[in-house]
Image (cartoon, rainbow, N blue to C red):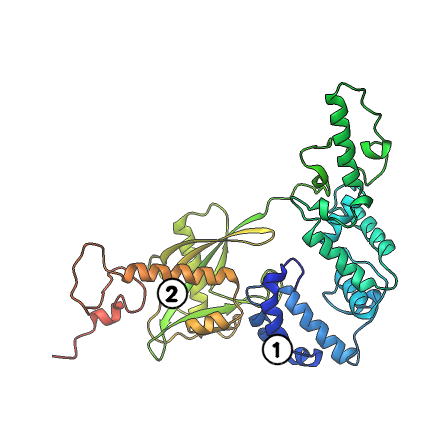
């Protein structure tokens, strides 16, 4: 859970997880749907899926016994990579093996003035070599946790607390800062500058030195390290999604949600019927394509003009800038869903929030509900008798507009 996620966010999820599945055997018996429901909102959903797959493998193939070395953990359990394997093996089983996460990368790059791209595979391998050499053989778990904590609390990305650092005297980045300050002071006093050390100037063929084309930035100090390559811009995607709504048996609105494929982005999660759009598509064409897509779900033609535009919802994944173009459509009568398509079901609002839906879909529903409230409220300046119900002429929201069938039906009362 802590991979790519902060401790403060994880705590509540971890507590609920351990209360529901306190043992490997309990987790192995859970369904992926249950796992996704509890994981909803935590992001990187493949982690939960792999965790449950690993539990099943331990129970069914390894006789309930966890692998106890980093090599076996990584080789035998799905979803367990180099870092997770090293952490489990050193902390739980006392194996003298290092760990390298984002915090450790930062500490090691500053300790050794590693100025090459810290995200490159070659540099990562060298950092793992360093971590394996440095790890305390008698207390590897404590050492690794201390090293990670040092990076999380003292050797932080910005404004590191170098004055409080217990390994400051061993830090080459700190020494570099001291030398640069001495050099600037001597230059200010008009004294001849000292000849820089070869190890400090970044020359030679060392693959860990900073590139000669990127000079030392004195304003950054130790935060010159680590250096990362420029991030690639996220992929831009547009998706049309429709909040299909009907009146439930108790009068409360129900929404149609469908399950995503079992692989890929947000695998196995539930969402409103959605369709990936081509870029620069005209709104009219968007409506037509979404209407055709919805027809496959509800088994009858959908008029593109009947889709009400709600707005756009933006959600940024780690590598995707996703824009959801949100529409809504209120359905009258029973709707027969095609069982040949992906699993689908009608849910109330409460059921929606307890289902395995992504944060993005929760944003979509929130936008829809906001529009409903806006359209059901009386127009500013108009007068209406207390207790009178709104009859929003253009609103698709239940309770604010009669359907065409109801409007044209002959009155039955006096």
Q: Is residue 257 left or right of residue 175?
A: left
Residue on which disc 1 sits: 19
**Above-or-below relation of 218 to 392:** above
- Residue 210, percent across and down? 77, 36
- Residue 363, percent across and down? 46, 60
Q: Is residue 14 left or right of residue 375?
A: right
Q: Are there few (<14), some (14-19), or many (20+) residues within 10 Å of tag 1? A: few
Give the SS element for disc 2.
Answer: loop
Q: Given the current orientation, which residue lies at the most extreme left position? A: 414
Depth check: give the residue in front, 50 or 205: 205
Depth check: give the residue in front, 401 or 155: 155
- Residue 123, percent across and down? 79, 46
Q: Is residue 29 left or right of residue 40?
A: right
- Residue 327, percent across and down? 39, 58
* Total numbered labels: 2
**What residue is shown at x 54% (from left), y 69% (from top)?**
356
Circles 1 and 2, Cβ within 8 Å, touching? The answer is: no
Give the SS element for disc 1.
Answer: helix
Looking at the figure, which quarter contains the N terminus? bottom right
What label does residue 301 carry, if any? 2
**Above-or-below relation of 406 to 201:** below
Q: Is residue 202 in sight in this rendering?
A: no
> Of discs 1 and 2, which sits in the foreground?
1
- Give the CA separation, mark 1 to mark 2: 47 Å
Looking at the figure, which quarter contains the C terminus? bottom left
Q: Looking at the image, is mark 1 or mark 2 earlier in the sequence?
A: 1
Q: Are there few (<14), some (14-19), or many (20+) residues within 10 Å of tag 2? A: few
What label does residue 257 carry, if any? none
**What residue is shown at x 50% (from left), y 47% (from top)?**
279
Residue 184: quadrant of the picture: top right
Depth check: give the residue in front, 300 or 265: 265
Q: Is residue 281 in sight in this rendering?
A: yes
């Amino acid at each position: 859970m802590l991979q790519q996620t902060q401790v403060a966010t994880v705590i509540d999820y971890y507590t609920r997880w351990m209360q529901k599945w306190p043992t490997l055997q309990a987790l192995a018996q859970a369904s992926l749907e249950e796992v996704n429901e509890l994981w909803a909102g935590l992001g990187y959903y493949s982690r939960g899926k792999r965790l449950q797959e690993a539990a099943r493998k331990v129970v069914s193939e390894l006789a309930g016994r966890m692998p106890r070395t980093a090599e076996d953990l990584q080789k035998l359990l799905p979803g367990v990579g180099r870092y997770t394997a090293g952490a489990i093996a050193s902390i739980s089983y006392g194996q003298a093996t290092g760990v390298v996460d984002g915090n450790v990368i930062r500490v090691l790059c500053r300790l050794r003035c590693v100025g090459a791209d810290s995200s490159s595979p070659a540099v990562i391998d060298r950092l793992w070599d360093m971590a394996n050499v440095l790890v305390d053989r008698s207390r590897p778990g404590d050492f690794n946790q201390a090293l990670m904590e040092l990076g999380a609390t003292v050797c932080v990305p910005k404004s590191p607390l170098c004055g409080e650092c217990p390994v400051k005297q061993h830090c080459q980045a700190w020494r570099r800062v001291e030398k640069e300050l001495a050099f600037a002071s001597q230059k200010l006093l008009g004294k001849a500058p000292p000849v820089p050390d070869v190890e400090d100037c970044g020359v030679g063929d060392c693959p860990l030195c900073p590139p000669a084309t990127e000079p030392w930035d004195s304003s950054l100090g130790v935060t010159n390290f680590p250096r990362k390559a420029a991030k690639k811009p996220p992929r831009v995607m547009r998706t049309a999604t429709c909040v299909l709504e009907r009146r439930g048996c108790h009068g409360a609105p129900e929404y149609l949600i469908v399950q995503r494929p079992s692989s890929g982005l947000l695998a196995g999660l539930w969402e409103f019927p959605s369709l990936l759009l081509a870029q620069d598509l005209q709104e009219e064409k968007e409506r037509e394509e979404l209407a055709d897509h919805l027809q496959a779900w509800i088994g009858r033609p959908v008029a593109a003009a009947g889709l009400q535009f709600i707005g756009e919802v933006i959600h940024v994944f780690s590598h995707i800038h996703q824009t959801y173009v949100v529409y809504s459509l209120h359905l009258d009568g029973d709707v027969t869903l095609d069982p040949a398509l992906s699993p689908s079901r009608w849910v109330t609002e409460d059921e929606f929030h307890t289902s395995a839906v992504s944060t993005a879909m929760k944003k979509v529903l929130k936008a829809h509900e906001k529009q409903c409230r806006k359209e059901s409220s009386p127009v500013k300046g108009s007068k209406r008798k207390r207790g009178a119900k709104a009859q929003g002429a253009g609103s698709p929201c239940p309770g604010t507009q009669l359907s065409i069938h109801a409007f044209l039906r002959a009155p039955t009362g006096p």
